[in-house]
Amino acid sequence: MERLCPVPIWKCNDCLNYKRLDEFNKSYTIPNRPVQYKCKKCEKKYRQKYVENIKIKNKNYLINNRGKILTYQQKWRYKNWDSYQEKRKKYRADNKKQISAQRHDYYLKNKEKISQSHKQWTRENKEKIRKQKQEYQFKHRKKYAENARRWRKNNPERERQNRQKYTKFRRQNDPQYALRVRLSDRLKSFLKHEKGGRTSESLIGYSMLEFKNHLEKAFIEGMSWEKFLAGKIDIHHIVPNAAFKYTTAEEKSFKLCWSLKNLCPEWREINRKLNDYLPDGTRAMNLTNKITTQEEFDYWYPRCLALRLAVRNE
Ligand SMILES: [Zn+2]
């Protein structure tokens, strides 16, 4: 023991002087000695003399022990999570300008790299991005519908043009859409002239009169055929049309989609809000297993019915 008097006095092994406790850096590893072998002054001298060597040594240590250091830091952060977040918050608040300048600087220097990695990330996470977007749109569907409605109201001419262009394109390129339009057009013309052609009967398995009676029975308060012809009421598919895939009227998929059970009148506003959403928030157009069998239809039907009720009660 080198302690000589009640005020702790420790010997420096370098300059050989006896010094006070606070003139040393602490040590936790040297047995029976709470301070380092060298006093602070001598340590400083040593550091100054070998500043380059120490830098290299430290750097090498960091490189060679990266994993160890990172896990240690991580453990520390988890253990002290609240104070760590607190510190980070404070640091960010105190150094706002500096941080944003650093970021900007980094961005300018690495523009190409950043844009490349961003592009790559987008490419690799297409599915994830699509899903997120879908979920977001479903969550905010009210707002989306409201915005779309407002836009249509403010731009009636462009809305009409867009609709024409869109329907023309779909009619020419999408047999499913063409069939759908044909049926609802037929119903409209039937309602105007009250004479249903035999062709529709063979196409869908029921006559236009039966179709009309079915819809009329399902009218809710305030609905009328005048409003239907005025475009305020849509023919609503309880399981969305987009959940089916058909190119001809002979397919089971078509028959399920256009079965009377799956059809009802709905206010245009609500029909648009429902769009082709499925009860889990995804969209029917993205459904990978389109509905082709009765069992699949029976699975979706009650769920879609519930979604419709939920949206109507919103
Ligand atoms: Zn010393």
Image (cartoon, helix red, strand yellow):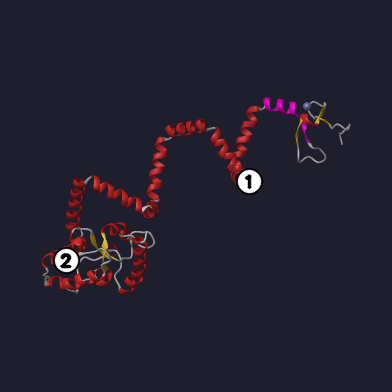
Distance from label 2 to label 1 (Cα)?
69 Å
For the residues labelled 2 and 1, say whether their Cβ atoms are less than 8 Å apart: no
- The residue range painted magenta reads 35-48
Furthest toward the right, the residue is 5
Q: Give the amino acid at mark 1.
A: Asn
Q: Callout 1: few (<14), some (14-19), or many (20+) C-alpha neighbours within 10 Å?
A: few
**Residue 187 got which mark?**
2
Q: Which image quadrant: the C terminus?
A: bottom left
Left or right side of 148 for 126: right
Q: Give the amino acid at mark 2.
A: Leu
Of residues 150 and 205, the one drawn nearer to the viewer in this rendering: 150
Q: Position of residue 233 (x, y in %)?
A: 23, 61
The answer to whether residue 44 is magenta is yes
Q: Which image quadrant: the N terminus?
A: top right
Task: Please name the residue shown 21% across and 48% down the image.
Answer: 159
Of residues 92 and 313, the one drawn nearer to the viewer in this rendering: 313
Q: Position of residue 167 (x, y in %)?
A: 19, 55
Of residues 263 and 134, the one drawn nearer to the viewer in this rendering: 263
The answer to whether residue 241 is magenta is no
| Ligand 1 within 8 Å of the CB at mark 2 | no
Task: Please name the residue shown 33% across and 65% down the image.
Answer: 289
Left or right side of 85 for 149: left
- Give the SS element for disc 2: helix
- Give the SS element for disc 1: loop
Quarter of the figure with residue 211:
bottom left
Nearer-N-terminus badge (2/1): 1
Q: Callout 2: few (<14), some (14-19), or many (20+) C-alpha neighbours within 10 Å?
A: many
Q: Vertical placement of 66 versus 96: above or below?
A: below
Q: Position of residue 230 (x, y in %)?
A: 18, 58
Dot in front, 2 or 1: 2
- Which residue corresponds to mark 1? 80
